[in-house]
């Protein structure tokens, strides 16, 4: 296994900003079967006090995964994506994500725990809006299987 435990704690540059659109929220809501009208009808969202459509809680993963790609693409980390199995995803919500938001995400390689010849890799991605207001913290864990281990 070539995972470099020295990369634990490394903070990656911010990912490209993500512009949240109504259609992205609607598509995501359909995909996860989030049927609340505030995800598809601007009037329903506005009636609840939001400026526009409100994203389902797990929508933050769309933004987080773009930032987490930096970890997978980091040659110094030594993670072979063909050996990765997604293990866990957790969300802490700090504020709503709404259509029209521009979101910024930055990932830290939080922890690398070597387990035999494999490893558990945990990342933390902080998501903020243009004003710097926290929107979500996404913690993701990946199991990197050892060479020769079949899925």
Image (tube, grey):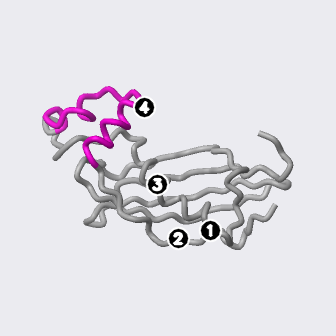
* Residue that carries the numbered disc 4 in the rendered image: 32
Mark 4 / mark 3, whichever is N-terminal: 4
Q: Position of residue 22 (x, y in %)?
A: 25, 43
Circle 2 Cα neighbour tier, 10 Å, few/some/many (<14 / 14–19 / ≥20): some
- Distance between the alpha carbons at the discs numbered 2 and 3: 12 Å
Q: Nearer the viewer, residue 84 or 11?
A: 84
Q: Quadrant of the N terminus?
A: bottom right
Element type at marker 4?
loop
Residue drawn 84% across the image and 55% down it: 117
Element type at marker 1?
loop
* Residue that carries the numbered disc 3 in the rendered image: 64
- Distance between the alpha carbons at the discs numbered 4 and 3: 17 Å
Depicted 92 relative to depicted 45: above or below: below
User: Is residue 125 found left or right of 109 in the rendered image?
Assistant: left
- Distance between the alpha carbons at the discs numbered 1 and 3: 16 Å
Element type at marker 3?
helix
- Distance between the alpha carbons at the discs numbered 2 and 4: 29 Å
User: Is residue 114 found left or right of 138 in the rendered image?
Assistant: right
Splitting the image into 4 quarters, where does residue 69 fall?
bottom right
Label annotation for residue 12: 2
Splitting the image into 4 quarters, where does residue 121 fall?
bottom right
Front tag of 1 and 3: 1
């Amino acid at each position: 296994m070539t995972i470099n435990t020295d990369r634990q704690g490394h903070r990656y540059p911010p990912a490209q900003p993500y512009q949240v659109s109504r259609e992205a929220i609607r598509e995501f809501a359909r995909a996860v079967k989030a049927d609340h009208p505030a995800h598809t009808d601007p009037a329903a969202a506005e009636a609840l006090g939001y400026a526009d459509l409100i994203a389902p809680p797990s929508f933050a993963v769309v933004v987080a995964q773009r930032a987490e790609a930096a970890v997978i693409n980091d040659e110094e980390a030594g993670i072979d994506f063909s050996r990765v199995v997604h293990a866990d995803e957790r969300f802490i919500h700090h504020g709503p994500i709404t259509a029209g938001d521009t979101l910024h995400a930055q990932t830290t390689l939080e922890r690398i725990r070597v387990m035999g010849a494999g490893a558990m890799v945990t990342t933390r991605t902080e998501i903020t809006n243009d004003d710097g207001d926290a929107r979500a913290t996404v913690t993701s864990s990946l199991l990197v299987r050892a060479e020769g281990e079949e899925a």
